[in-house]
Amino acid sequence: MQTSDAFAGLECQECGERFDADELRPSSPDSQTRQDAADAAGRCPDCGGALAPTYDYDRIDLDRETLADRSFDSQWRYRELLPFEPSAAVSADEGGTPLVEGSSLADELGVGELYVKDDGRNPTGSTADRGLSVALTAARERGVEAVALASTGDGGQSAAAYAARADVDAHAFLPSRSTFTNKAMVNVHDGEMTVVGGRIGDALDAAAESIAEEGWHDLGWFATPYRHEGAKTALFEIVEQLDWEIPDAVVVPTGAGVAAVGVHRAATELERLGLIDELPAIYVAQAAGCAPIVDAWEAGHDEPEPVEYPDTICGGIEIPDPPGGALALDAVAESGGGAVATEDPDILDSAIAVAANEGLEVDASAAAAVSGAWELSRTGEFDDSDTVVVLNTGAGSKTDDVLRSHLMGQGI
């Protein structure tokens, strides 16, 4: 594997045990060693905790000036803090997305400054591209021939696109309520799609069964150590785009927890390297009809309880049993942030307000972060001196039918 110089292997986020990344090989129908099983599940073979790349930080020589001299064209400019060399990357120039100031939104919220990190401008229109670029790089480096995952939509589309670049077969399991765009583009990228009736839990069950039977490499949330590793680059960019001024808050729309965990991981690494002096507060935003992480935060629990009857139109973040829930709660607590849930009509109103007042297109599910920021401001969490960044995880065009139907329902 063409790993980066400081990459030191994989570390369990629960027990701290470390593993050589080369030892954890993908499973096959004919081989189920301890390491194979761990890799297939993306979990520590000792305690079952989630794995993440780790680095020898003493070997990393990175400063602001070095980064300033590099082209701001993809996430691979942060090569010292990614597991693989850019020359090995399966990349479509993901990352390098704009941080757009929203002055009218800042006025509406009563905050000093508000910015939208527009990850809807990634190659397949979502922040999923960051993590799946890294995950497909790992898969190709290991000689994987087929990958699979269950997804609410964006991840399936992104996995098919990056698998095409890696010359790897892709299998995506999507619930029937996934958007037409996501479904169509899985096939357009030559991926094999299975549409499962019901919701994401049904898609996860179907994917797990097929992965076990076929020996496909699992790219699901926290079923690979590399998706949340790619997600962290969004925060690297945000800090640079703010000229190294740390935002007071980063509000992240959250389903599985990948983006929230990645953003926090990035902040801790920048602090460890002495590039920043403090962590931004991370706020998890969910839809009230499916808010297991918010519920756990408000109840003071370390782990979320699964939502028995999820009910939200925001299908992209409707994940009743988030695999990264405990890690997301840790991120919120360690950063001094919080968690907020808002109702579907407020979320859709927020997406429309961003489009009408700022000209930015925000996915219906991603708008939970905008709506959450509004609610946090209303309840006094933010004040008129705060700098707030909202992460837009998906292009509004993916859910144009949902947004327009809501708009028409208002009689506008």
Image (tube, helix red, strand yellow):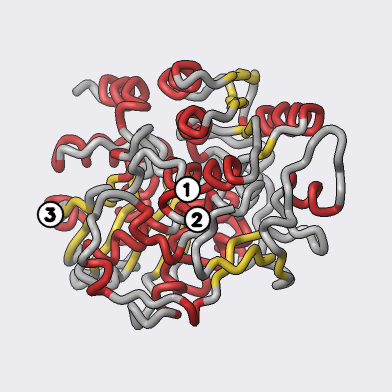
96 and 407: which is toward the camera: 96
Pointer 2 and pointer 1: residues touching (CB < 8 Å)? yes
Nearer the N terminus, badge 1 or badge 3? 1
- On the image, the x and y values in percent for residue 270 come to 40, 73
Q: Residue 411 occupies which quadrant of the picture?
A: top left
Q: Which mark is in front, 3 or 2? A: 2
Q: Residue at x 26, y 20 (%)?
A: 408
> Is 57 located above or below residue 75 in the figure?
below
57 left or right, relative to 149: left
Res 103 label: 3
Q: Is residue 10 above or below residue 285?
A: below
The three-letter amino acid code for the residue at tag 3 is Ser
Secondary structure beneath dot 1 equals: helix
Residue 245 makes an appearance in the image: no
Give whichever of 382, 227 is nearer the camera.
Answer: 227
Residue located at (19% from left, 51% from top): 100
Label 3 to label 2: alpha-carbon separation? 38 Å
Which of the pair 289/117 is nearer the observer?
117
Q: Which residue is mark 2?
A: 84
Near mark 2 (Cα within 10 A), the count class, few <14, some 14-19 or many ≥20, is many
Q: Going from the N terminus, do you reach mark 3 or mark 2 first?
A: 2
- Residue 315, compared with residue 305, is above or below; it is above
